[in-house]
Amino acid sequence: MSNAVYAALTRQSGLMQEMQVVANNLANSSTTGYKSDRAIFAEFLAGAGAASEKVSMGGVAAHNFDLEQGGLRFTGGRFDLAIQGEGFFMIDTPAGMRFTRAGHFQLSEESRLIDGQGNPVLNPAGGAILIPEDAEQVSIGGDGSISVDGELFGQVGVVRPEGQLTRDGNASFVSEDGFEAIEEPRVLQGALEQSNVSPVLEVARMIEVQRAYEAGQAMLEKEDQRINKFITTLRQQL
């Protein structure tokens, strides 16, 4: 296989991965708390057959998430929370700690504050948040403090993950390097943060990637024809 084919194939593979990222962004353009994704490509050297031959190729090395705040949708829900500015809510899942901006919470049968999958929402100390069953009025302040019938009862944790974020689900992230508390969080009760995906920009990216893929496919077909012509000519001379 020629070096040109090697390079073209790795380019096509990268474009397919980029298309998957774009398609996932579009599919989650209405997902609460979703953050737009960008694929980051890196160059590497790969063997091309002979021990001394190397070909410069590329591939997806990492993902870069656009953490810019999405628009707010006011719901009036008692446990619908949105973070203004930086920070994430902490969620305790069976797979470990997760961070999310999707604040559509509710109460479990045990009166714990949970997310849509039944995972506990955590306070700044990493503990579960309990709301009395007989609570008539629950107010959540701008700093995440929870008041039940006028009495301070706890606080919703808002933290800053440290290190590289990895997506785990559409609107949740994991960080292996821990987190630090946001000293002055800004929490808004009765609202949800919408996705920060711009459908118009994503469609434009999809068209661009599709055209690049079609151009690469045409190049592969021409290279295949060139190789076949070379082989045919060589056979005729033997």
Image (cartoon, rainbow, N blue to C red):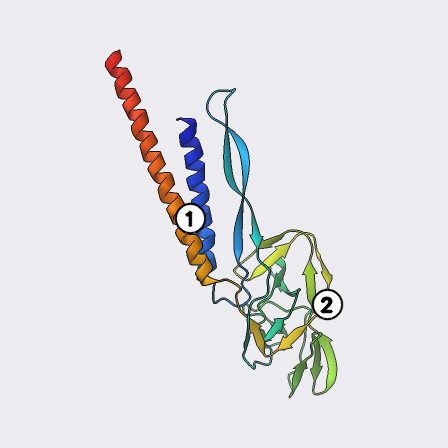
Of the two numbered discs 1 and 2 on the same chain, state the one appearing first in sequence. 2
196 or 191: nearer the viewer: 196
**Helix, strand or loop under label 1:** helix
Q: Locate residue 204: give its quadrant.
A: bottom left
Which residue in the protein does label 2 denote? 124
Which of the two marks, 1 or 2, is nearer to us in this view?
Answer: 1
Identify the amino acid type marked 1: Val
Q: Separation of disc 1 and disc 2 at Cα?
A: 43 Å
Question: Horizontal placement of 174 versus 124: left or right?
Answer: left
Q: Measuring 55% from the left and 60% from the top, which residue is drawn there?
A: 35
Q: Locate residue 237: give its quadrant.
A: top left
Q: Measuring 69% from the left and 52% from the top, which residue is drawn there?
A: 177
Q: Measuring 41% from the left and 36% from the top, which residue is drawn there?
A: 9
**Helix, strand or loop under label 2:** loop
Which residue in the protein does label 1 denote? 209
One can see residue 178 in this view: yes
